[in-house]
Image: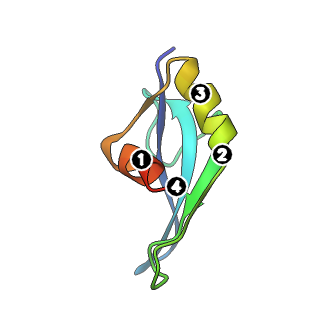
Amino acid sequence: MSVKIRLARRGKKNAPFYHIVVSDERQPRDSSFVELVGTYDVSSKEKRVVADKERIAYWLSKGAKPTETVSKLIKNI
């Protein structure tokens, strides 16, 4: 099973809110996931990122590959 760390969109129309999730790469973007490891709030002025660094490090050590956007967000934490 190939695992990715990616964003899953939540929120209302024109007010996006993303969950940073660990999921099987074969699943659609907003479907089931293995674990929720953080959130990303785009609609706030500061674009807040809240993530569990330990769980992200754990999944990266197990071979999970972050998407390009998530890897940029992780670097800023």
Q: Nearer the viewer, mark 4 or mark 2?
A: 4
**Mark 4 surroundings: few (<14), some (14-19) or many (≥20) residues within 10 A:** few
According to the picture, the residue beneath numbered tag 3 turns out to be 59
Instruction: Give whichever of discs 4 and 3 has the lower sequence position.
Output: 3
Mark 1 vs 2: CB contact within 8 A:
no
Instruction: Give whichever of discs 1 and 3 has the lower sequence position.
Output: 3
The alpha-carbon separation of the residues under discs 2 and 3 comes to 11 Å
Instruction: Give whichever of discs 4 and 2 has the lower sequence position.
Output: 2
Give above or below for 74 relative to 27.
below
Asked whether the viewer can see residue 35, the reply is no
Image point (47%, 48%), residue name: 74
Residue that extends furthest to the left in the rendered view of this protein: 68
Image coordinates for residue 24, horizontal then vertical, percent? 51, 27
Residue that extends furthest to the bottom in the rendered view of this protein: 45
The alpha-carbon separation of the residues under discs 1 and 2 comes to 13 Å
Image coordinates for residue 17, horizontal then vertical, percent? 51, 68
According to the picture, the residue beneath numbered tag 4 turns out to be 77
Secondary structure, mark 1, is helix
Asked whether the viewer can see residue 70, the reply is yes
Instruction: Give whichever of discs 1 and 4 has the lower sequence position.
Output: 1
According to the picture, the residue beneath numbered tag 2 turns out to be 36
Image coordinates for residue 38, horizontal then vertical, percent? 62, 53
According to the picture, the residue beneath numbered tag 1 turns out to be 70
Give above or below for 20 relative to 39.
above
Secondary structure, mark 2, is strand
Q: Residue type at mark 3?
A: Trp
